[in-house]
Image (cartoon, rainbow, N blue to C red):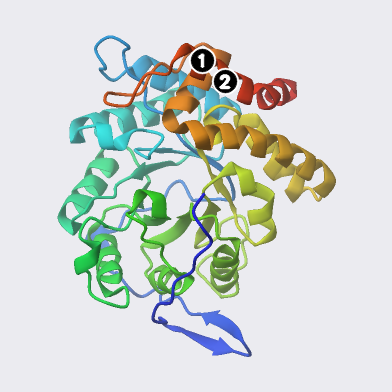
Amino acid sequence: MAPHVDVPSPTGDFASNGGELSFRRDLSLGSDEGNVTTIGRPLIPGVYVPTLCFFDPETEKIDTESITRHTVRLARAGVTGVATQGSNGEAVHLTHKERQLVTATTRSALDNAGFSHIPVIVGCGAQSVRETVEFCREAAEAGGDYALVLPPSYYATLFAPSSETIMKYFTEVADASPIPIIIYNFPGGANGIDLSSDVILSLAQHPRIVGVKLTCGNTGKLNRIASATRNTTTKNGNDLDRPDFLVLAGSADFTIQSLIAGSHGILAGLANIAPKACMRTFELYKEGKIAEAQRMQEVVSRGDWTAIQGGVVGVKSGLQSWMGYGGFARSPLPRPTGEQSKAWKEGYRDLMALEKTLL
């Protein structure tokens, strides 16, 4: 997990009020009605899963049957939402058409199994505004409800100072995208770029930017964002079940820590393997059963360390070992050795024992 760094950045349109940030969201922005879609599947608190992409072990073609099977399994376990085209979904290994196929298959699987209410978030980050918007449009066409967007990073050394380039990028993408944007703060996947709470709060004022996933692991940053975006009058009033700006932790190993800090839940890869354990940890905390939640969190955190160490290769291996499907990542990622598969299976043992006890 990345170090807890919150780098300085310029303040946006939020003011100091007795030492606290007073967040002011201007809902009049981005009023181009021709570009704004109606949100039929709102983002609500809970557990979101960045789903895996599955391939034929011989040809490496997209395995739509396994995508469908996995999506329905997650939905039946009670997850709140799913996300395609993330790092767990090997988006960087897919063509534009393949990305659309995966998202369309996921949406169709949910609808056909009676889970049409579950939103689909789609990873759409790219290095240029132009291609990012193209990904967003393709995601919408394939049935995606929201776009998860990493900041550009390849030319980071040439960016304008004080996060000006980052601010401009997200603003232009949000203005042009047919679906709302969720900021993805993942320094490990963005050349070390770690957006500060100031930058995220400035961007959060855009009416088309509706959430953030914090994989930086910084609970202090999370708390500042959650507090500032919660303590305001918004279009949903005081409806805590439908926050205007969804704040999600990016890893299952700090689920209850993030909830204490004010998050609305997690968007975490471990839920591919143990969706019920991730959901139950969230629910126990919300029910006020803190001691039980902490005990479950301990098991989840140990399992998540195995997932973190093995990455998508280890998660797929664990899924194959415990659930009978999963397969391999696309080349050039290596296929696990027998010893690695055995070690990863053992690393998930306690977690899977817990998962099997949950209804």
Residue highlighted by disc 1: 339
Residue 233: x and y, percent? 56, 75
SS state under label 1: helix
The kind of residue on which mark 1 rests is Glu
Q: Residue 3: x percent and y percent?
A: 51, 58
Q: Quadrant of residue 100?
A: top left
| Type of amino acid under label 2 | Ala
Q: How many neighbours does mark 2 have within 10 angstroms: few (below 14), some (14-19), or many (20 or more)?
A: some
Q: Quadrant of the C terminus?
A: top right
Direction from residue 190 to residue 252 in the image, left or right: right
Location of residue 45 in the rendering, given as x and y in whole percent from the top left corner? 59, 50
Please say whether residue 32 is visible from this viewpoint: no
Q: Is residue 34 above or below residue 309?
A: below
Labels 1 & 2 near each other (Cβ < 8 A):
yes
Q: Determine whether, in the image, residue 292 is placed left or right of residue 222.
A: right
Q: Toward the viewer: 191 or 170? A: 191
Left or right of residue 319: residue 158: left
**Dividing the picture into quarters, in which one does residue 87 lie?**
top left
Look at the image and tell me whether residue 286 can be seen.
yes
SS class, disc 2? helix
Question: Up-down: is 291 above or below 101?
Answer: below
Provide the residue designation for mark 2: 343
Q: CA distance from mark 1 to mark 2?
A: 6 Å
Q: Position of residue 74 (x, y in %)?
A: 54, 28
Q: Nearer the viewer, residue 74 or 54?
A: 54
The answer to which of 253 and 245 lies nearer the viewer is: 253
Residue appearing at x 50%, y 23% in the figure: 72
Residue in the image at 29% along x and 61% along y: 174
Location of residue 67 with respect to 169 vertically, above or below: above
Q: Residue at x 62, y 44 (%)?
A: 253
